[in-house]
Image (cartoon, helix red, strand yellow):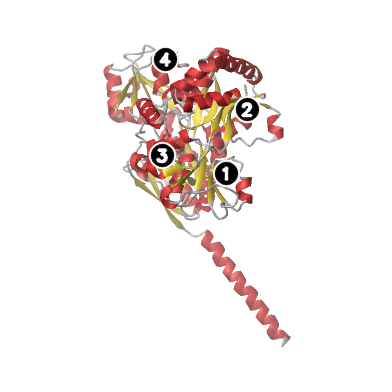
Amino acid sequence: MNQLTSNHTGNSLLVFFIMFFVLPSPAFATGPRVTTALFSADKSEIHAVDFPPFVSSDVVDGGAISELVNTALARGGVDAVISTHPIQRMVRYYLLQEDAMAVIGWHFQLTAEQKKHLILIPITRLPEKYFYYKPRHPNGLMINDVSLKGLRYGAHKGEDTSTFEKAGVEVQYGRSIALLKKLKNNELDFICSPPKTVEWLLDRYMSDEKENFVSTAGDAEKQLFYIVFNRKHADGEMAADKFNKALKDMVNDGTYGKIVEKHLGKGDDGKLYLRRLETFK
Amino acid sequence: MRYLKALESIGRVTALLLLLSVAVSNSYAEITVQLHANESLPFFSKTMQLNGMAGEIIHAASKAAGITSIIEFRPLKRMIDDDSNNDLGNPAFYMGTQEFSAIIPIAVYHMAVFHYLPNHPRHPEIHAVKDLEGHKIGVLKGTLVDRSQFEKAGIVFEESYSQESLFKKLQKGRIDLVIEINLVGKTMITRLFPSDRESFGSVLIPKSESPIAILLAEKQLNGNALGVRYRQGLQKIRLSGEYETILNKYYGSDGLPEHYIRAMERFTIIYNDGTE
């Protein structure tokens, strides 16, 4: 059982993120959102789901994955800009209905037919853990086939939950922050998420509750985070080639590592993401 | 005996039909829904007739759907912090922290770059971030999203706490440009400078459209069904022309921004099947 606050790199990362967070508080419910994407009408758009601290306009340089993508695009000479959206279905809509040049994300649940028109390039592999709310489960929570029946699992849209469903788990869907709130309100028993995302969201929205959200031992899932280029877009295939080459060059010349280190620190967390990348180079 | 049995059967069927009719009539009964808005002229306002442009659309669509919508005004921070209420506005402001059972886009707004003609007679040509370089640009505090990216590009903004302050600075030449919602800026200029409003120019920012929506809380009773009724009501007033009449009242002689209807259709598709 790992408490978030006992994470060995947690404190240094917390300071790092607090230093660089930009926490805009909108003044009007119909107010403007002044983004760089707003002044890039002539550029192709790459759509992404807001997924802090990896992809988010609330994090310096848009987060680690945004900076990796932007750097690779610039190196490859691909004139495109990232637009972040609050929900997954918006990203899918732009990819599949409006033939956007590319999207960034995970859990896309694309059909074989859809994949024929798409080029999936992994950017990183995100380690995940199971989290639960300790006051609801003071004796801890075991996540195995025997112990799951009757529990409630909070999933991200697109996640493969078939194993849990077969084991008699009730599955509810939502975005990360909503799932964390449901854990606290005893509407869910456990969720699966990258620890960095949980840490970021708790820091921002429930800092006084941070001690109460704990993870089970060991990694739960390892999800690939992709950039998906669209062959239906006039420049999609060419942009994918350029991007792929630039990303490989960034890994080889150390740029990739420097960006990961900038966002995730020199500790084990940063190394973890680098190590994962080697598996799909 | 057979006659009595037949009567009994008819009685049962009648009772069943009566029960069904009550259930159906209840599902379409007048219902009152409380919605929270933030004062944001001219879209939502406590002081404007029928609560402003978006308020008028909501009341008209509600009437067409047999719903009584009560709009209460709250500070935005309270609306965002409250996870159990029904919100009005741009979904992007609320969806980061709250789940909704239905999101119904009702209108679209666009952003514009404003300038003061005596100081800057030419319309600003802003097509890329670099085009902002060398200008003193005013924005409302809290609206700047990816600040670090702008700073990297050497763009510095002057942030103000109120729209009044922004447009007064623009008129005095303390800033060159203001980035604001098209209709909000025009309303503010008309209020602040009624005799000088022709001296202000504006250029719509392409692809800057955002939705204004009714966001029904996840725990709103019968939220999905209510969402369907709101959508039906909206469709009725769009077909009858009432929707267009309301928009024309606010957009006036400038007319609707190009692609307004297309943007409205897109947001309707994106949010129609739920929130994910």
Q: Secondary structure at mark 1?
A: loop
Asked which secondary structure carries label 2, the reply is: loop
- Labels 3, 4: front one: 4
Q: Are marks 2 and 3 on the same chain?
A: no
* Residue A184 shown left or right of residue A69 in the figure: left
Q: Residue at x 60, y 74 (%)?
A: B15
Task: For label 4, count other residues whose C-alpha is less than 10 Å away and answer few (under 14), some (14-19) or many (20+).
Answer: some
Task: Locate the C terminus of chain B and report the quarter of the image it occupies.
Answer: top right
Of pointers 4 and 1, the one earlier in the residue sequence: 4
Q: Amino acid at mark 4?
A: Ala
Q: Earlier in the sequence, mark 3 or mark 1?
A: 3
Q: CA distance from mark 3 to mark 4?
A: 37 Å
Graded by Cα atoms within 10 Å as few (under 14), some (14 to 19) or many (20 or more), the crowding at tag 2 reads some
| Residue labelled with disc 1 | B273
- Tag in front: 4 or 1: 4
Residue type highlighted by circle 1: Asp
Q: Measured along the vertical axis of the image, is residue B226 above or below residue B180?
A: below
Q: Are marks 2 and 4 on the same chain?
A: no
Q: CA distance from mark 2 to mark 4?
A: 29 Å
CA distance separating discs 3 and 1: 25 Å
Q: Amino acid under label 3?
A: Met
